[in-house]
Image (cartoon, helix red, strand yellow):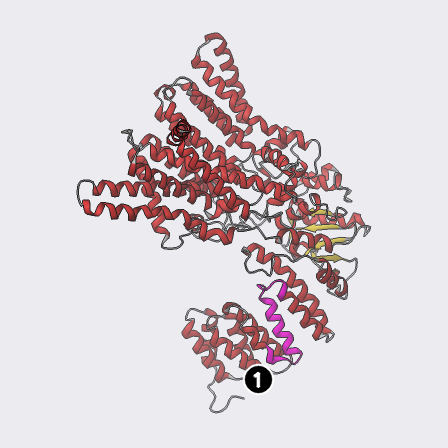
Amino acid sequence: MDANRSYFAEIWQCRRHVIVALIVFLAAFLIYNATKAPTVSFWDCGEFITCSHGLGVPHPPGTPLFVEVGRIFSLLPFISDPAARINLLSALCGALAAAFAFLVTFRLIRLWWSDGDFTGWKMMATYFGALVGASMAAFGNTQWNNCIETEVYAVAMFLVLFLTWVFLVWVEKRSEPGADKFIILLVFVGLLSTGFHMTTFLFLPALFVGVILLSERLRRDYRLYISCFTLYLIAIDLDSFLIANGLWLAVLVFMAIWKRTYQWCLPLILLLAGIIGFSSQLYIPIRASQNPTINMGNPTTYTSFRAFLERKQYGDQNMVMRAFTRRASWLNQLGNHERMGFWGFFNQQYGINGRPFAVLFVLGLLGMYELVRRQPRIGWPFVFLVFLGTLFLVWYMNFADGTRIDSLTGDGQLEVRDRDYFWTPGFMLFGMAIGLGVAGLMEMMRESLFGRFTYLRKPAMILVSLLVLLTMVPVKANYFSCDRSQNFTPYDFAYNILQSCDPNAILFVGGDNDTYPVWCVQGVYGVRPDITVINLSLANLPWYIFQIRDRMKVPLDWTDEQIMALRHHAFSSGQLYRIQDQVAEQILNVNRWERPIDYSISAGTDALVYKGRSLMDNVMMQGMIYRLYPTPHAGRVDIEKSLHLYLNTFKFRSLADSTIYKDAQSMALTTNYTTGLELIADSLARVKRYDDAIGLINKAISIVPYSYDAYAFLAQLYVESGREQLVPGLLSRVPHSSAADIYYAWGSANKKVGNRARAREIYGMAVDSFPHDADMFREYSLILYEDKDMTGLRALVKRWLEDNPNDDAALRLQGQLNKTKQPTGKDS
């Protein structure tokens, strides 16, 4: 018994940090698994799930290893939902990333104690700092979201931190025989990681800097520099990568055979390890040649494969060259600009936001300072890693803010979604730096109190030890927004679109969120396989047009040469005639109404064009799609079919549950439901079926309670049906900011039914409640003008300008009123 106790005590003494890392892994995995999405999510998740399920080729630059590993997870027998099986991959890799975040932070702090003393306060500071760093890294908002859905970033971050840990192991063992095997592992995993995501590969330069700083032997070996340089060329250009590595490989093989020395064998092994790691990319052309269901870019030839890896689909320039032409101002890219400003995402990561974030920011800077001060040859590479994951990526990704748009190609449009996930490595590494700062602050406190103020030492130590509670801050702050465990919105949205379609229809969709989830629900879950889904955004690209014609068997009578010759151009009116418009037009021409033509509502009205004119008069809404007819259609809505879909077929899980977080994109997309129900209700109201219309809008509110325009529409129906007394009750059911829409609809409805005096009264109340609402001011001033109440109009303008002195339109109106003869009596 004593022997066993001694054995386990020895294990705990030597490997306690590994045991704590396992505990961190388990805790992170349990939390990720508890909050992971139960099915498909929006954005790229549906594409990755579908590609993993059927071994497809996802969008450039491709993720072959992710698809292959995802396929293995799709076969797991103990999870019923196929998407949830693949979501588990992200949860598992996220938990591994958390464990390695702890191990890396632990090793970095452990290196501070060069005297070998690792007991008492030093050990406590090390463990507390590593735990805080791991928590900040693992439960930062962006990384947590990556770990609960099928995305590549959880895997990528696990690999980044694994490589950093391997580097630190090499640091510890670099003087021992055989230590170079860790360098070989770094190169192999670094190039292998390109099969998951290129993010990992971008961080190898920082580790290379650490290697040459710490090893004089390797620092003086020019062969190592050449091998690493030629391998890194893949981040720039495939041609250069293949030519340089081919030539250098030939030289190394020749010299290794001739010289037979280790100095020539090591760079040869490094080069071969990198090439073998990168060979996972061969999956892309091999699988593409087999014509899978999803075959983005169709990279079956060397030219198309090169363009695929270099992301030419997103522009003629590769990413490096594009970075030199700024697509936004530096202020917007670095600041708080919507969807793409770095700082706007950075200070919301760890649960302490706004000005209090300065405390965490200073702790992170302190941690990096302490690391550089104590171990500069390790500290500077770590700082370089943080730089690469933050400011360098601001330059490299070059996100657009919507102010520098190419009118022909559309490049430069505001980013379609929040781009915080690209900075995940930087956010995680800075979170670990916060942990370094905690350890540094604890050590500074110990040093400052050593030998003096001994009576303060113990209470001060206890107080500073409370910093370990920072581990709970991001978990508590981000749990609600990162909990997807009951969120079925993306699946239901895709399901409802497909169920709205006519049998054997051609369905035109517009963007990621009405495409990827639809692909997944159709291809993975087997819902409505009779529908042919065509993404109009991809229809601007020749490879996709070929797939429409050849794989989807959609009627297109263009030759290969005609497809390759397609270009954007403009009509004489100046309206842009996009390739996608030409493709849709050609499909309509050749189809000759043999197959139904449907458009998803979320595709937008700009998709409904034919030879430059709108097709809105030729469509009828049914559920979540517009059905196209050959002649103008009298009705805007197929009332009976839409009612059947909304009341009997559609799924609306998660939407009305206030305990489930909905991001802005989900809320915007799902308000399409209320838009559809409002169109049906409007059609009912036109034939005086007000009871049915009001019941339908109440149904819409019960389905999507955050769609506040439905409340405004209900106010309009109440007025038109003679139930105006019910309108004030709506105001208490919406946020103050949305009440303006109800006032606006309330006043407009009274104006419509001829009760102008009541409309004026309502607009007056609205302007009092919303003194900065320009639309309300405009409506009120218009009705006063129409009623020839110049006295009231002058008073309104004067009061408005007191609250809005810089309103140019109001100033011009005031000038015009001042030129008008003042009335001597009552205005007429």
Q: Position of residue 47 (x, y in %)?
A: 63, 43
Q: Position of residue 364 (x, y in %)?
A: 35, 43
Q: Nearer the viewer, residue 749 or 522?
A: 522
Q: Which picture quadrant has residue 262?
A: top left
Amino acid tagged 1: Ala
Q: Nearer the viewer, residue 514 or 166?
A: 166
Question: Going by the picture, which residue comes out furthest to the top?
Answer: 258
Above or below 434: residue 234:
above
Regarding residue 665, the answer to whether it shows in the image is yes
Q: Nearer the viewer, residue 322 or 550?
A: 550
Q: Which stretch is magenta?
A: 701-726
Residue 705 lies within the magenta run: yes
The quadrant of the image that shows the N terminus is top left
Q: Is most of the magenta stretch helix, strand or loop?
A: helix
Residue 694 lies within the magenta run: no
Above or below 119: residue 481:
below
Question: Going by the picture, which residue comes out furthest to the left?
Answer: 452
Q: Which residue is mark 1?
A: 757
Q: Which picture quadrant has residue 542?
A: top right
Regarding residue 572, the answer to whether it shows in the image is no
The answer to whether residue 181 is left or right of residue 661 is left
Question: Going by the picture, which residue comes out furthest to the bottom?
Answer: 825
